[in-house]
Image: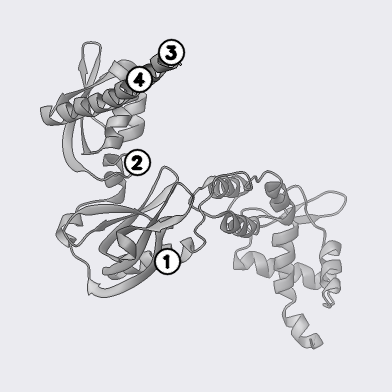
């Protein structure tokens, strides 16, 4: 590269050096900067370095100087501080939604937000290999295609699969397409879901990592009236395990010890009414098997007060579970009796 072109790039190389090689614990001297520039074929004098540092500061880089035996310089405030990047790295590596390969790619990019030494320290604390990860490598393209369709208020078509007991993909609807009106994407229980309206007007949830062959349909989506007042955050509060169901306003009686659990689940704006031994809450939920499972986990510490129809469905759900175990226990006992006389 011609010498003049190199000289024009001097300030860019200097900015790269400061961003990649310096932090609060590793300031660099002017001589370190001159040495780096020379290694890249760029000559520099001390006076020009000082001038470039002033220009970079005026441009917006937070260049901090520290005095010691020699004056050192480092980048102070960055777009992302080290604790913030560490949080992002932890979120990426623990996400089941991302494949192992994509997690590692993202973490490498996140490392570039801090200095090289800080990035290396981050890398030493990353453990992606042993974590459960999705197997769908096209996940990024899926999210991008769905996001574009939502923004343009268009329908989308796709095929949807599930895993069988042999670990094989099995397409639903015999491989036929789904055609839905997409509204928003929700992160729940370490998975990404599309909330959409089906052709028959039913709200459905689809795991994004199980969607393939996504394409935007140019026809406008349906259901604008149904979703105009729905926010993703409020909708997520109503769902359990992203199972769909009939929306009901349910009143629950809870023991005092569960106050924290209820506020965590339904939000800090939850209204409680004191009662002897505990409190009541009224919340909108999508009544589903997962909602009943969530309730059952509290034993007799939570009770459905109303509506009676939901209470009865919950009791029927429990009876079905007990019936299944009773039948299995009966078969086991019968088998034991047979074995006594063999």
Q: CA distance from mark 1 to mark 2?
A: 24 Å
Q: Residue 104 in the image: state x and y as whole percent.
A: 62, 56
Q: Residue 244 in the image: state x and y as whole percent.
A: 25, 45
For label 2, the SS is: loop
User: What residue is shown at x 41% (from left), y 64% (from top)?
Assistant: 212
Q: Nearer the observer, disc 3 or disc 4?
A: 3
Mark 4 sits on what residue? 329
Task: Using the image as rendered, state which of residue 145 and residue 171 is in the foreground.
Answer: 171
Q: Earlier in the sequence, mark 2 or mark 4?
A: 2
Q: Earlier in the sequence, mark 3 or mark 4?
A: 4
Q: CA distance from mark 1 to mark 3?
A: 66 Å
Q: CA distance from mark 2 to mark 3?
A: 48 Å
Q: Nearer the observer, disc 2 or disc 3?
A: 3
Mark 3 sits on what residue? 341
Task: Using the image as rendered, state which of residue 284 and residue 293 is in the foreground.
Answer: 293
User: What residue is shown at x 77% (from left), y 82% (from top)?
Assistant: 6
Q: Looking at the picture, does residue 260 appear above or below residue 98?
A: above
For label 1, the SS is: helix
Mark 1 sits on what residue? 144
Left or right, residue 245 beside residue 209: left
- Asked whether residue 116 appears in the rendered view, the answer is yes
Q: Earlier in the sequence, mark 1 or mark 2?
A: 1
Q: Earlier in the sequence, mark 2 or mark 3?
A: 2
Q: Residue 2 in the image: state x and y as whole percent.
A: 80, 88
**Going by the picture, which residue comes out furthest to the front?**
342
């Amino acid at each position: 590269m011609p010498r003049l072109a190199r000289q024009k790039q001097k300030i860019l190389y200097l900015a790269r050096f400061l961003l990649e090689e310096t932090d609060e614990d590793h300031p660099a001297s002017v001589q370190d900067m001159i040495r780096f520039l020379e290694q890249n074929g760029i000559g520099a004098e001390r006076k020009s370095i000082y001038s470039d540092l002033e220009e970079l500061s005026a441009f917006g880089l937070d260049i901090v100087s520290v005095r010691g035996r020699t004056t050192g310089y480092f980048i102070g405030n960055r777009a992302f501080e080290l604790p913030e990047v560490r949080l992002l790295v932890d979120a990426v590596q623990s996400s089941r939604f991302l494949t192992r390969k994509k997690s590692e790619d993202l973490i490498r990019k996140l490392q570039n937000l801090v200095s090289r030494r800080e990035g290396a320290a981050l890398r030493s604390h990353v453990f992606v290999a042993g974590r459960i990860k999705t197997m769908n490598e096209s996940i990024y393209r899926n999210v991008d295609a769905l996001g574009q369709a939502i923004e343009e208020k268009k329908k989308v078509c796709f095929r949807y699969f599930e895993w069988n007991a042999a670990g094989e993909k099995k397409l639903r609807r015999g491989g036929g397409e789904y055609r839905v009106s997409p509204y928003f994407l929700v992160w729940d229980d370490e998975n990404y879901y599309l909330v959409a309206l089906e052709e028959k007007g039913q709200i459905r949830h689809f795991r994004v990592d199980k969607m393939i062959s996504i394409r935007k349909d140019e026809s406008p989506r349906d259901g604008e009236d149904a979703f105009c007042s729905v926010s993703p955050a409020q909708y997520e509060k109503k769902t359990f395990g992203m199972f769909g169901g009939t929306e009901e306003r349910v009143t629950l009686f809870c023991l005092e010890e569960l106050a924290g659990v209820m506020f965590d689940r339904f939000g800090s704006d939850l209204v409680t009414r004191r009662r002897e031994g505990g409190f009541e809450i009224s919340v909108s939920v999508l009544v589903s098997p997962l909602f009943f499972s969530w309730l059952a986990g509290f034993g007799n510490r939570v009770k459905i007060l109303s509506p009676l129809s939901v209470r009865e469905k919950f009791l029927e759900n429990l009876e079905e579970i007990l019936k299944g175990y009773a039948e299995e226990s009966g078969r086991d006992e019968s088998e034991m009796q047979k074995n006594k006389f063999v």
